[in-house]
Amino acid sequence: MLLSDFLRHELDLTGTHVGCEQGACGACTILLDGLPVRSCLIFAIQASDRELTTVEGLARRQPDGSESLHPIQESFWDAHGLQCGFCTPGILLTLVSYLEENSNPTEIEIRGAISGNLCRCTGYHNIVEAALLAAERMRHGER
Amino acid sequence: MKPPPFEYLAPSSLPEALDILSENGDDAKVLAGGQSLVPAMNFRLVEPALLVDLNGLDDLSYVTKEASGEIRIGAMTRQRTIERDSLVEAALPLLSETMPNIAHSQIRNRGTIGGSLVHADPAAELPMIMVALDARFRLRRSASERWISAADFYQGLFSTDLADDEIMVEVAIPPLKANAGTCFVEFARRKGDYALLGVAAILSLDDMGICREARIVYLNAGDMPIVARVAADLINGEKPTPQLFVEAANHAIENEITPMGDIHASVPYLLHLARALTVQALNQAAIRATPLLGK
């Protein structure tokens, strides 16, 4: 069973989306031991004893049981970085990892970082704006 | 789509993996990074009865330098690791320059050097760079091992000298000479796409500023990496000038490469592209080979 199907059908974590099942579209991107990978190209059994992060893991649970969104989620909301949302989880996780390595990216660098994530709705403009906003907020210590 | 059912084994040692292969022959397929094999399985282009997962073999992932300066890379080393490795950057700038051109970061996080090399996609960067760098591959089967040059390893479209019971375990790459200038350039319509065509150029300048040891290798200009020997020989012994490089490019295009046209680009377009990229790569390699103009 593919990891993407395992997450969605066995764990009911449907935030990870399935687009192409060949590694090209990026909709299935999750973090494996902190690094973005295509869950459609990994078999579920290969994730044994590994740490996975899906989009459901970005929000932070507060002591009172409520959840607060990750700054990148807030930024995508504020900057209208999504329309249908199908590509969004893959992009969020890709960017979360990328911003750890490069906390002050230029627009060109962000476009390069998300080159492996296809979006049919937005034309990428607001995705880039949201990413820049997230980077700025995270540099100022938001988490 | 999804693959049909298959058996799966995850050996914990290389000898165990080799024994499984020798017992199962061509019913078994080795799983490395999975970035080429799993798409093929998802499309049902390949339906192995048995998958032998090498991802538990941590001792096949390393980058080291021999006393001779030769770089040794374990076959299961992730492309991401090679991309960021300082030994590679110092000794093999051509390889470092090439790595970010391979697919996307998410693919490189999982894809391995060995997996790409044995898959032998003519549009893949790693096979042609290994040919350009005169790399050798160590292939092991249960009872023996052998070395083979990259040039001898590649035999045709997706076709290598690897036997059904062999696993590539290591890549050995001689360091570039200190006075060598190198350049890799490819053209893809969008960042991360398979390149329509690419070129790697290596050349040195001797004390008189004359070109020596020129090497021109093509990506996706045939069904395997193509070394344009005659074009490179036109360059050796001459002063580096743009006109010389155009002449070499013309020779390579007219006599030494055979790109296959498809829906993305016609053959005439690819030949035109090859000429432009060859001249670009040679010029850049010459600049980088020039002392004081820098690396």
Image (cartoon, coloured by chain):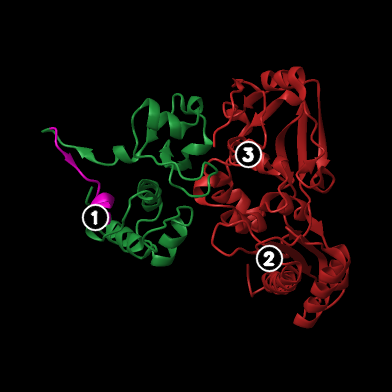
Chain colours: A green, B red
Decide if residue A51 is in sight here. Answer: no
Image position, residue B244 (x, y; %) = 81, 79
Q: Position of residue B181 (x, y in %)?
A: 71, 66
Q: Amino acid at mark 1?
A: Trp
Residue found 25% across the figure and 46% down from its top: A70
Q: CA distance from mark 1 to mark 2?
A: 40 Å
Name which of mark 3 and mark 2 comes first in the sequence. 3
Q: Which mark is residue B265?
A: 2
In the picture, the disc for residue A77 is: 1
Type of the residue with mark 2 = Ala
Q: CA distance from mark 1 to mark 3?
A: 37 Å
Q: Which mark is residue B121?
A: none
The quarter of the image holding the N terminus of chain B is top right
- The secondary structure type at the circle numbered 3 is helix
Please name the residue shown 47% across and 37% down the image.
A39
Residue at figure coordinates x 71%, y 74% from the top left: B276
Residue A68: quarter of image: top left
* Mark 3 crowdedness (10 Å alpha carbons): few <14, some 14-19, many ≥20: some
Label 2: state its secondary structure: loop
* Residue A76 is one of the magenta-drawn residues: yes
| Vertical comparison of B36 with A107: above or below | above
